[in-house]
Amino acid sequence: MATTWLGPKGRDAALASMADEEEELDVLVVGGGIVGAGIALDAVSRGLSTGLIEARDFASGTSSKSSKLVHGGLRYLEQFDFELVREALHERGLLLSTIAPHLVRPVPFLFPFSKHWERFYIGAGVTLYDTLAQTSRNNRGLPTHRHLSQSGALRVFPALKRDSVAGAVQYWDAQVDDARYVTTVLRTAAGLGAHIASRVQAVGFLREGEHVVGATVTDLEKGGEKQIRARQVVNAAGVWTDEIQEMVGGRGQVHVSASKGVHLVVPRDRVQASSGMILRTEKSVLFVIPWGRHWIIGTTDTPWDLDKAHPAASRTDIDYVLDELNKVLRTPLTHDDVEGVYAGLRPLLSGESDETSKLSREHTVAHPVPGLVLIAGGKYTTYRVMAKDAVDAVAHGLGGALPPSVTDKLPLAGASGYQALVNQRHTLAHDSGLHVSRISHLLRRYGTDTRDLLALVKERPDLGYPLEGSEDYLRAEVVYAVEAEGARHLDDVLTRRTRITFETWDRGIAAAEEAARLMAEPLGWSDEQVEREVEYYRKGIEAERAAQEQDTDQEADAVQHGAPEIVPEAEVRRG
């Protein structure tokens, strides 16, 4: 499989191929989150000519703002949804062992309890969790859970108040950089021949009678409308599912509700612990998740019916997360300890309950009209199963049999040979002149594609230095984000290709100008475009900070909704 670079020329070529009047795709996927990316990969790996369009940046919605976990979902055991948990744990094993061992890694979690009788209840649940995982042929052999006394729990998590914990159970799950994973799936699909283009918005469907035969799209970067013909179109728009359905008339067969989840990021030294932690609250499950030199703490679970593109975190959200965690911490966290905040929306299939935590995380596939497949619901961990089911529905619509899905055996870009390259990290460090810890960091982000980064550094030694304002990332990673990973704007790089936006106290402001200037050459930006990108990014951060001072969702949304959008190429040319 060829290594594919989703750079500016690649985007233009992909869009031109999709819009070729003499060509017709087998399947066009609308939506560039994890589900859409998975569908594109499943479809092209089964021999279908495949295209994917995304109205914004890849993974810019739900798929970049999750809890970064690959897990079965312990709380679903309480809802007796054993099949969902079993399926998710099976997928966890695949991701760890075969599909993406470079991007998905094990992480331990402490499950403390304050009453001794809870040990049996929690222990039974975690025992079932481990048992379901071990029934999978693809279980990587993560450590099984262990019971801890009060003293044992405090040794693992010294930050806990002694009187808040009577004991604990420690178990293992896995985590992933969600946005980076989506980009890697898309690069893998493109390497097999899929046409992938961001900043391309579906504005209507092409119809022949009652059949959908493609989509009318707008190029949001360069302007102009195009028509993309396809034998089947898949609506994989997540929380925007209803809006896409409206293009064919009416709400359709499926209704998706949005639930807002807010996460806080604090420095690692603010919470003394050697393990993650999970807590049950009255309204949600609260995770404390190790994330490099930081902790990610979340999440909330509240209905959201305001701006879906930019869900806003309010002071009330932040207070809730801090208050719940502070119930068990010896040294309470304050707003001053919070270096980053992000809010995302979960796409939930609506049920009869008004509480989003009770809505289904299972997925559904439907054929609302001939030629259009819709997929909605689900959870990040089971994206591959969702993609398989969607392509099976596409096969039905095409009226013929397809080869079975092979994505359970298909390593993503950067995965093949990963462990061997990890073993060679000292040699790579010596040859490149980079510290071995820097090489390890790159390997965890790019796998064997780290060699592409090192080739950039060899060609341009200045790219081997850290980015100003963010020591964790090399200048080369900014250039690579544009040339290989489809980043087109400053926010794409600072928020999703790297995580500088929520990993630094200034939310990436200090890194913004240097990053923009590094992007300028491969994207052909003028000085004016560089200045506008930096200014728009700065204003967006100001709006986010102001929203986080508001008490209600409505107030926070009103403030953040006013932030400027990205600067398309066409707008700069007109200016």
Image (cartoon, grey):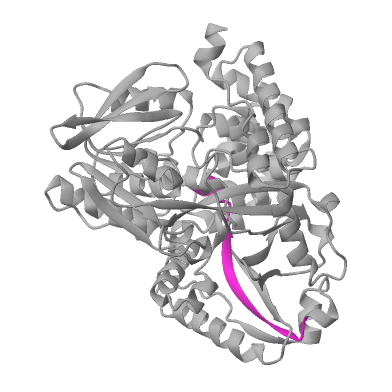
Q: Is residue 510 left or right of residue 352?
A: right
Give the image location of residue 134, x and y in percent.
Answer: 46, 80
Vertical side of 161 occupied by 557: above or below: above
Based on the displayed image, in which of its 4 quarters is residue 297 positioned? bottom right
Camera-side residue of 117 and 383: 117
Percent position of residue 63, x then y? 51, 48
Residue 223 image position (x, y, % from top left): 43, 16
Look at the picture and state if 62 lies above or below 230: below
The vertical placement of 256 against 126, above or below, is above
Left or right side of 9 for 206:
left
Q: Quadrant of the N terminus?
A: top left
Q: Is residue 371 left or right of residue 542?
A: left
> Which one is in front, 432 or 53?
53
Task: Count the numbered circles shown.
Answer: 0
| Residue at the (78%, 35%) spot, across then down | 469
**Is residue 166 in the magenta section?**
yes
Lateral position of residue 349 relative to residue 495, left or right: left
Residue located at (73% from left, 36% from top): 508
The answer to whether any part of residue 489 appears in the image is: yes
Quarter of the image where one finds residue 189:
top left
**Where, quadrant-wise, is the C terminus in this rendering?**
top right
Q: Using the rendered image of the protein, determine whether residue 462 is visible from the camera's viewpoint.
A: no
562 within the magenta span:
no
Picture coordinates of residue 36, whole percent (x, y): 39, 45
The residue lying at 54 percent from left, 83 percent from top is: 125
Q: Which residues are magenta?
A: 165-181
